[in-house]
Image (cartoon, rainbow, N blue to C red):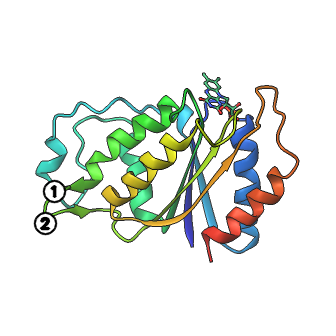
Amino acid sequence: MKILTLLGSARKRGNTAHILAWVEGELKALGHEVERVNLGSQEIKGCLGCAKCKETLDKVACIQKDDAEGILEKMIDADLTLFTSPAYFWGFTSQVKTLMDRSWSLVTGFHTPQHASLVEGKKQALLVTGGGSYDNNVEPLFTAFDRLQKFYKGIPAGELFIGGCGGDGTLPEDAEERAIAFARTLVK
Ligand SMILES: Cc1cc2nc3c(=O)[nH]c(=O)nc-3n(C[C@H](O)[C@H](O)[C@H](O)COP(=O)(O)O)c2cc1C
């Protein structure tokens, strides 16, 4: 399987990157092709809401020329895209949210019978890290992601939240084990 992973933390050696590396290691060990994009190193401008992309249905047609188009094309090309993000104030990081907004270019006719998506039938998954626990904290990220997958006409491949991740790099004892188990569920 061709797998695209999106690191949504600006910290390339932070908790999310650390846990993502365990997931990627297991995916590669299982024989899958994995490519990571560090969103924090990309130029991704905010969506203008101009709807110009809706005038061309068969490709990403955003009028803004930056790195978003290439990332969205990688999503179209991949069988599975794994989004990752640390929780930032009960939401996604700005890096992840900005790409999600720009992914409007992938879809036309949402909420109409003409609803079409350039990633229809592709798999998406979500990995979130946070300092706190799930309840009363990160539910909004998972709710938004579930809705985004319906917008994409995508296939849910899995979701994982690892809480108790400290700013000093402290991770829960079972983080590696859970990351590896998660990787296996993504491709089963
Ligand atoms: C600006 C900021 C906001 C945060 N907001 C939350 C939050 O709402 N909920 C939570 O559980 N953790 C929150 N955290 C903690 C981080 O999500 C957590 O430490 C995460 O594992 C950091 O990942 P990273 O090292 O990959 O950046 C926040 C951290 C920062 C810096």
Q: Position of residue 163 (x, y in %)?
A: 72, 41
10 Å crowding of disc 2: few (<14), some (14-19), many (20+): few
**Residue 109 got which mark?**
1
10 Å crowding of disc 1: few (<14), some (14-19), many (20+): few
Give the residue drawn at x 62%, y 61%. 34
Residue that badge 2 annotates: 113
CB of residue at label 2: within 8 Å of ligand 1?
no
Quarter that holds the N terminus: bottom right
Viewer-side residue, 47 vs 162 = 162
> Is residue 10 toward the left or the right of residue 167 in the image?
left
Element type at mark 1: loop
Q: Position of residue 69 (x, y in %)?
A: 35, 45
Q: Position of residue 180 (x, y in %)?
A: 76, 62
Q: Amino acid at mark 1?
A: Gly
Give the residue drawn at x 62%, y 77%. 188
User: Count of labels shown?
Assistant: 2
* Picture quadrant where residue 146 is located: bottom left
Viewer-side residue, 141 vs 100 = 141
Asked if residue 90 is positioned above or below residue 74 in the image, the reply reads above
Q: Amino acid at mark 2?
A: Pro
Element type at mark 2: loop
Give the residue drawn at x 22%, y 37%. 63
**Residue 97 got which mark?**
none
The residue sitting at the front extreme is: 136
Asked if disc 2 and disc 1 are in contact, CB closer than 8 Å, the reply is yes
Question: Is residue 67 among the parts visible in the rendering?
Answer: no
Q: Quadrant of ligand 1?
A: top right
Which is in the foreground here, disc 2 or disc 1?
2
Question: Is residue 75 among the parts visible in the rendering?
Answer: yes
> Is residue 157 toward the left or the right of residue 15 in the image?
left
CB of residue at label 1: within 8 Å of ligand 1?
no
> Is residue 84 toward the left or the right of residue 22 in the image?
left
